[in-house]
Amino acid sequence: MEQFDAIVVGAGQAGPPLAGRLTSSGMKVALIERRHVGGTCVNTGCKPTKTMVASAYAAHLARRGADFGVVTGSIAIDMAKVASRARKVILDSRHSNEQWLDHMQGLTLVRGHAQFEGPKVIRVADRLLQAERIFLNVGGRPRIPDIGGVQDVPFLTNADMIAMEGVPEHLIVVGGSYIGLEFAQMFRRFGAQVSIVEMGPHLIGREDPDVSEEVRSILQAEGIEVRTSANCIDLSTENGVISVGVDCVKGPPRLRGSHVLLATGRRPNTDDLGLTKAGVAVDAHGYIVVDDYLATSAPGVWALGDCNGRGAFTHTAWNDYEILAANLLDGENRRLSERILGYALYIDPPLGRVGMTEAQARATARPLLVSKRPMSRVGRAVEKDETQGFMSMIVDAETKLILGATILGTAGDEAIHGILDLMNAKQPISTLRWAVPIHPTISELLPTLAGGLVPLQ
């Protein structure tokens, strides 16, 4: 039995920095990773996909050269080069993380699959590791839906997409949320015919209808076919061609394409950890149940990142680490419930979101103020000739605190931070109203947006 002060399972976004804080405080720490250091973000998520988004944007802008008075020749896509760029970003980031861990004093990096043998004991192959503190940062993987034909038809996941060195003739994307929409627009810009199939009535169903419909318009304007209300999705092959059953309200009942991407959500990597042996409870979807301090049902065991179901983003995983480090090592009292959630959808133009949607705000039954402006009113967007989208805000009419905001438009993923910071500082809307932002920027319309608030009917 190998003894440690702490064991961290998973070297994703939260695990390594937590190991760094624990070792720097004098603890002997084991960090267990069964595959690649860096987790989803580095290896199959944020970093490679946003690298490919950048390539797709370059192709899109090159095709629009004439709009800006720039004369270009024929635009071609070197998909092998696109994949090579993404692969280099992955390997560079992974190597950087590995070097960091290799030089971390007090850390033992254990390669292999971790499983609980008991409340404080973890097995990795023929090794047994014991610690009074165990931190689970095991992440997630693509959820494969239980639909007809899924076992018989070759399908792609996000991990497969970033390794593709050729452009599909016709890519069918099953799933109309963040991952699916980013790959749909990206590969359309690489030259593929693209269709999106979504079971729900709207794309990105968690958003307000005006956001969903504007995103749909943006994608359709680029020639992407969008089929919502797909209530009978199944897969099959016909003479080597992939066929996807749709059965939508309108349109043909089946789509036929060369490739199909399943982008129907994520599931936590918790089913093979032996959690019951440790007394760690999970919910109906397999997510580890945690309290406001990230503690599980088992004493001395905490869960961070995607596996706890309390945030599906790199930045929320990092914040989980920050909360734990602050509470365990710095004597603070940080809680998950204090976190104001912001996130982005990286289509072009991007969607930046923070706080409540309008539907969520209405559910509070509080008096509300709202404001909305099209991006065509933003000078910077006009100058860049990127005027699709809008920005909106919702405010508590009595406290004058911002409850939520949306910026769907060029640089929306950056500009939203002005509102996110204000919400974290618990400042009233008047603080934003009388700010003097820089011209010309996207953010300069935010005080105007704040000045246009009216009661929500």
Image (cartoon, rainbow, N blue to C red):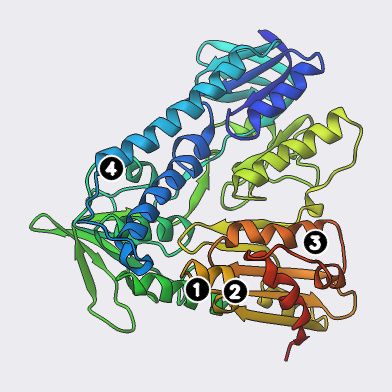
**How far, Cα to Cα, is label 1 from label 4?**
32 Å
Q: CA distance from mark 3 to mark 2?
A: 23 Å
Where is mark 4, residue-wise? 164
Gap in angstroms between the C-alphas marked 2 and 4: 37 Å
Q: Compute the Cα span from label 1 to label 2.
A: 8 Å
The image shows residue 326 at horizontal and vertical percentages of: 84, 35
Q: What amino acid is labelled 3 in the image?
A: Met
- Point out the tag, 1 or 3, that comes first from the N-terminus: 1
Question: Which residue type carries mark 2?
Answer: Val
Nearest the viewer among 15 and 290 is: 15
Does residue 315 appear to the left or right of 92 in the view shown? right
**Position of 254 relative to 262 (above/below):** below
Asked if disc 1 and disc 2 are in contact, CB closer than 8 Å, the reply is yes
Extreme-top residue of the structure: 1
- In the picture of the structure, the residue carrying the numbered disc 3 is 423
Residue at point 73%, 31% (across, down): 301
